[in-house]
Image: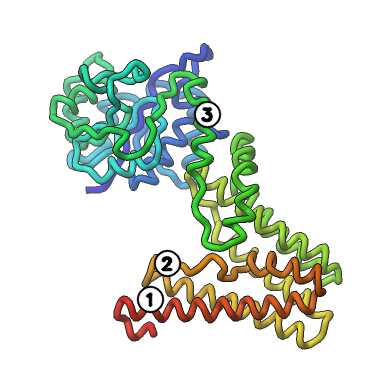
Amino acid sequence: MALAALIIAIETALDGDDGLRATLPLLGRTVVEHQARQAVGAGATHLVLLVERMPAALTAALDRLRRDGVAIEVARTIGDAADRFHPDERLLVMADGCVADQAMLDALATLVPPALMTLPDLADTSDYERIDAQCRWAGLGLLDGAAVRSTAAMLGDWDAQSTLLRRAVQAGAQRVDCAATVDGRPRIAYRTQALEGLDRHLLRASRVPARRWPRRWLFALVDGPVAGWLARQAVDPVPVAAAGAGLAAASAALAAAGWGAAGFCLALASGPVAAIAARLARLRLTDIRHGRAIARARIVMLALGLLALGWPFGGASLLAAALTVAAIGATTSALYGLGGLSDDRGPAWIADADAIAWGMAPIALIAGWPWAIAGAALYAAASFGRMQAHFVRAARAVGDPGAV
């Protein structure tokens, strides 16, 4: 059965401003936005928010989610929420203000309901709701629609979250220790201070190993700190990605106008800006809207810039630039083909558009543009040959002679 999510957003934060736990700030957005995106990341396709009042901050958060394509319904009572779930539907239950590691939700989503994430009953876990003398609830659970419906039928004036927990315990819910999934524990956002330091943890967790050397060893020096700062300023990743493509377009225009060095500097800068946009999107647990189109536009602009850079130096340099563009395109096609055969994407030195640009820089400084363009052609050709060999080996390994 499809996975759904029930996010509870009822309790008032202890900050004295009458705001909800769900609307406390987290990396320039709100706790509830982070919860909703985590639920989607775990595979939930149907989200319901249980809330008794709708302050302006919560309305704005839901509007941002819907603008980004996250469909989330609002239920004012547990009975209303129960009516929105199929009895056999599996649903993640996220406690009020609970912010957890994505791995916890992913692990929970693979289980059979009922199941509960737990913590040991220790002195420093007293803020979590008690289950028994040995453990406390970590704020995450996996139930089914029937359990929510039966709870709603007998709830009366009792607290919905606590009653759902008690019913799950009585039903013999499997208990999963948080330490079995990740080294850490969820945070319960009772107040703003409860989220202190969490942004740094999320920033570290948002780093994804890059395939190619510029992003792995150069852009990684700046994309984390800058993306973290932009996230706190509530900047959307789309304009950052567009800025990367804009820099590439400006570099092509400057190169065509005869300002090759200035254009090349902008081409170099477009790569880190694109990496920052990607890191910012990962922090927000979202995709960049129109991200593929923006990325393709940037690559096309970089290719045009390389051709414009080779134009003033005669036919040989222009031919080398054209061969570089063709080889990078063919390497990219081989990479997509490899995706259906193997998880391996080749060594980090394989060229992409950014690797070509950054590889050209030292040659251009030492020997000039014609040699830099010739070096780019050789680098791109070597990368294409290596990826073709990799593709053939992968095809043979899976017994697909047609792919060879």
Closer to the chain start, of discs 1 and 3, is 3
Q: Which residue is mark 1?
A: 394
The residue drawn where x is 67% and y is 56% is 244
The answer to which of 91 and 404 lies nearer the viewer is: 404
| 202 lies above or below 396 | above
Residue 88: x and y, percent? 18, 42
Q: Which residue is mark 2?
A: 344
Given the current orientation, which residue lies at the most extreme bottom position? Answer: 315
Q: Spatial distance from mark 1 to mark 2, Cα to Cα?
A: 9 Å
Closer to the chain start, of discs 1 and 2, is 2
The answer to which of 217 and 10 lies nearer the viewer is: 217
User: Is residue 60 among what the camera can see?
Assistant: no
Residue 203: x and y, percent? 53, 40
Residue type, label 3? Gly
Closer to the chain start, of discs 2 and 3, is 3
| 348 lies above or below 94 | below
| Residues packed near mark 2 inside 10 Å, few (<14), some (14 to 19) or many (20 plus) | few
* Residue 372 found in image quarter: bottom right
Residue type, label 1? Ala
Instruction: Please indicate whether residue 399 sits to the left or right of residue 61 in the image.
Output: left
Q: Secondary structure at mark 3?
A: loop
Q: Secondary structure at mark 1?
A: helix
Residues at discs 1 and 2 in contact (Cβ within 8 Å): yes
Please give the label number shown on residue 197: 3
State how many labels appear.
3
Q: Spatial distance from mark 2 to mark 3, Cα to Cα?
A: 35 Å
Residue type, label 2? Asp
| 250 lies above or below 303 | above
Q: Name the quarter where the C terminus is drawn.
A: bottom left
